Image (tube, rainbow, N blue to C red):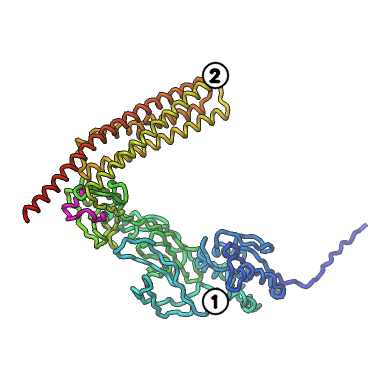
């Protein structure tokens, strides 16, 4: 039996496969901002996506795909992304060779690839891109001054450098003027010539969202599609230019004392990291013969040398952050497909670090017959070139005097660290009670490129008072110290008694309950407050001692008892190397609260009690010592008043004799 197999060929009309049209939609949170029309940018985009008539027109010719910048579907469009990365989103959709891309955005690009760096990829793939601003129509001509780049603060009277950028449309090649105003008054005017407009590779067409229908009418027709497809096939057979290697040499500013890159040991790779003002020289090899090459530093194009397969250029690192970009055009007409943008990390030479160690505060009182030592330190990575002391009285002009070698107690001018000691003597400056003098320090580094970095210290204000007022104020300070020591002794005795009671209450317990541990921790907090207050009293007493000596109320010898009290308080609070009894008691209480077992807890509680006992005795001893000194000083003060009264009487008698 024979079986005949018949093949049937069905002929159906061939259907042309539609090319993809991508609607690329910004889903960053800034799209939720309202427009002048009172609706958000996102609402304007939703209106376009909901225009059925427009979508039907498009779907006759294209397979329409709507996708957000972050790759999500546009069906549930809710902008919330933290960044606007137009370049990243565009690069992703270009890989699928769409017929065209329509970008809906506010175009506040702040992350990812610079869209301009995709020029080569757009040219290679022959993809037209349409930019639709999700806002009202922009004016045909506009000029915008972008946020200036500069330090928001500057020393009074110092030269201040400010850099700015201008974005413009409709003023190509025209000259404009930028005014600098201070308090509504024009202080400077700078002429600026605006750059000619230029478009990378295939021109990006632009429209406001209310004219999107007109813009989409410019989509490629069938004939244009054929031409584009032929160009795509041609490009696919060619090689785009690319860097096969790049070498970098650094020439550092001379004042840094750094060794320049040896000619035979260049750095590899395009990323730049160097001190600001460093001269950078680079060379690179290219895989294809070149017809053109461009170098841009930030927004500025700079000259570049090229041969068929080699490029070379140089520039200076001017800012802490920046970038440089290369654009290569091969003789076959292709541009570099991959972005050739490299980061520039400039290490700014900071101003010297300038600190006034003494006086520690912003203002002080001083007797007209007293003196006030100042101690200031200057540090700079590359050396200090000058230090000056500046002073003024009554809010007048600052007077500056350079620091002399005799004032330098550590280091020298030119070194990386300089310690300066200077004594303010009001009488030598002709100052009297009622005057006020302001003192500050100024320092400069060794930078000889673009001007030196200058640092100005904080200002210390010294009010000159009569000796009697200073004495009264010092007496009040000492009395406050005595009252504080009284209170701290009582608080420490109370904490000691409570710790003893807790030791007895918990003696039989192997493990403490949560409530019992909480009671120990509360006592630990109380002991910590005692330790902190002792530090404050110690600092107050030290300040009173310095004030008395500076104002010549007593000599170093007369302050011996006061120094003894300070030593006792120093021992009470301890330092980084050794805990004093007060903080040691606090630590022992904390250890007792977390200890496991009766033996370990009891040991730590006994240690806390011992430390508290020592703390009580030393607080009381320090108080007696200060009280003894205060009594002696009261005698001195009484004698001084008697002498002053006698001098006043003598002056009055002399005046009467003269008559």
Residue to which mark 1 is pinned: 138
Using the image as rendered, state which of residue 565 and residue 479 is in the foreground.
479
Residue to which mark 2 is pinned: 508
- Left or right position of 6 against 159: right
Q: Residues within 10 Å of mark 1 (few under 14, many from 20)?
A: few
Q: CA distance from mark 2 to mark 1?
A: 84 Å
Quarter holding the N terminus?
bottom right
Query: Range of the magenta residues?
Result: 422-441
Is 434 inside the magenta-drawn segment? yes
Using the image as rendered, state which of residue 617 and residue 520 is in the foreground.
617
Is residue 130 visible in the rendered structure shown here?
A: no
- Please name the residue shown 48% across and 75% down the image: 198
Label 2 or label 1, whichever lies nearer to me, is 2
Which circle's residue, 2 or 1, is located before the other in the chain? 1
Q: Position of residue 644 (x, y in %)?
A: 16, 45
Q: Position of residue 313 (x, y in %)?
A: 37, 65
Using the image as rendered, state which of residue 59 and residue 127 is in the foreground.
59
Check the image and report above or below for 553 versus 166: above
Res. 175 image quadrant: bottom left
Q: Position of residue 122 (x, y in %)?
A: 55, 69
* Element class at badge 1: loop
Quarter holding the C terminus?
bottom left
Q: Residue furthest left?
A: 658
Using the image as rendered, state which of residue 374 and residue 207 is in the foreground.
374
Is residue 270 visible in the rendered structure shown here?
A: yes
């Amino acid at each position: 039996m024979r079986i005949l197999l018949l093949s049937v060929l069905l002929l159906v009309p061939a259907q042309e496969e539609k090319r993809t049209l991508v609607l690329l939609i910004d889903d960053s949170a800034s799209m939720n901002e309202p427009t002048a029309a009172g609706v958000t940018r996102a609402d304007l985009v939703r209106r376009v996506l909901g225009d059925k008539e427009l979508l039907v027109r498009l779907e006759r010719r294209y397979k329409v795909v709507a996708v957000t910048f972050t790759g999500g579907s546009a069906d549930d469009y809710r902008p919330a992304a933290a960044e606007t990365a137009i370049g990243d989103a565009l690069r992703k959709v270009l890989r699928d060779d769409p017929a065209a891309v329509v970008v809906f955005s506010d175009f506040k690009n702040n992350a990812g690839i610079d869209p301009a760096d995709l020029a080569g990829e757009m040219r290679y793939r022959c993809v037209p891109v349409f930019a639709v601003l999700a806002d009202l129509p922009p004016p045909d001509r506009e000029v915008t001054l972008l946020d200036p780049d500069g330090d928001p603060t500057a020393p009074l009277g110092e030269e201040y450098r400010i850099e700015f950028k201008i974005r413009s449309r409709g003023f190509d090649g025209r000259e404009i003027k930028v005014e600098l105003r201070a308090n509504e008054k024009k202080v400077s005017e700078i002429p600026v010539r605006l750059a000619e407009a230029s478009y990378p590779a295939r021109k990006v067409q632009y429209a406001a969202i209310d004219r999107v229908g007109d813009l989409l009418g410019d989509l490629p027709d069938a004939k244009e599609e054929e031409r584009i497809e032929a160009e795509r096939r041609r490009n696919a057979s060619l090689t785009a230019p690319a860097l096969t290697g790049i070498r970098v040499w650094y020439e550092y500013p001379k004042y840094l004392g750094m060794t320049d890159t040896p000619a035979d040991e260049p750095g590899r790779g395009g990323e730049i990291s160097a001190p600001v003002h460093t001269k950078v020289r680079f060379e690179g090899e290219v895989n294809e013969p070149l017809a053109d090459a461009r170098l841009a530093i930030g927004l500025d194009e700079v000259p570049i040398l090229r041969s068929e397969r080699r490029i070379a250029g140089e520039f200076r690192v001017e800012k802490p952050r920046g970038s440089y970009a290369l654009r290569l055009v091969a003789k076959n007409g292709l541009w570099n497909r991959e972005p050739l943008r490299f980061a520039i990390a400039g290490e700014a030479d900071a101003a010297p670090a300038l600190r006034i160690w003494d006086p520690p505060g912003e203002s002080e009182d001083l007797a007209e017959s007293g003196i006030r030592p100042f101690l200031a330190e200057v540090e700079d990575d590359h050396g200090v070139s000058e230090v000056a002391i500046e002073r003024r009285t009554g809010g007048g002009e600052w007077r500056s005097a350079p620091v002399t070698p005799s004032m330098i107690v550590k280091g020298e001018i030119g070194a990386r660290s300089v310690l300066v000691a200077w004594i303010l003597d009001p009488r030598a400056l002709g100052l009297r009670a009622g005057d006020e003098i302001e003192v500050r320090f100024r320092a400069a580094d060794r930078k000889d490129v673009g001007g030196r970095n200058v640092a100005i210290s904080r200002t210390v204000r010294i009010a000159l008072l009569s000796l009697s007022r200073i004495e009264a104020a010092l007496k009040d300070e000492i009395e406050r110290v005595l009252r504080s020591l009284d209170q701290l002794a009582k608080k420490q005795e109370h904490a000691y008694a409570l710790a003893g009671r807790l030791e007895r209450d918990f003696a039989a317990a192997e493990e403490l309950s949560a409530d019992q541990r909480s009671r120990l921790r509360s006592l630990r907090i109380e002991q910590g407050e005692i330790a902190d207050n002792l530090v404050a009293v110690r600092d107050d007493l030290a300040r009173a001692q310095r004030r008395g000596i500076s104002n010549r109320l007593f000599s170093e010898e007369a302050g011996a008892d006061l120094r003894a009290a300070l030593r006792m308080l120093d021992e009470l609070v301890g330092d980084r190397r050794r805990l004093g009894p007060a903080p040691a008691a606090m630590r022992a209480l904390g250890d007792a609260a977390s200890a496991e077992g009766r033996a370990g807890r009891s040991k730590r509680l006994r240690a806390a009690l011992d430390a508290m006992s020592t703390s009580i005795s030393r607080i009381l001893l320090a108080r007696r010592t200060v009280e003894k000194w205060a009594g002696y000083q009261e005698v001195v003060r009484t004698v001084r008043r008697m002498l002053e009264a006698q001098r006043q009487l003598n002056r009055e008698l002399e005046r009467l004799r003269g008559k």
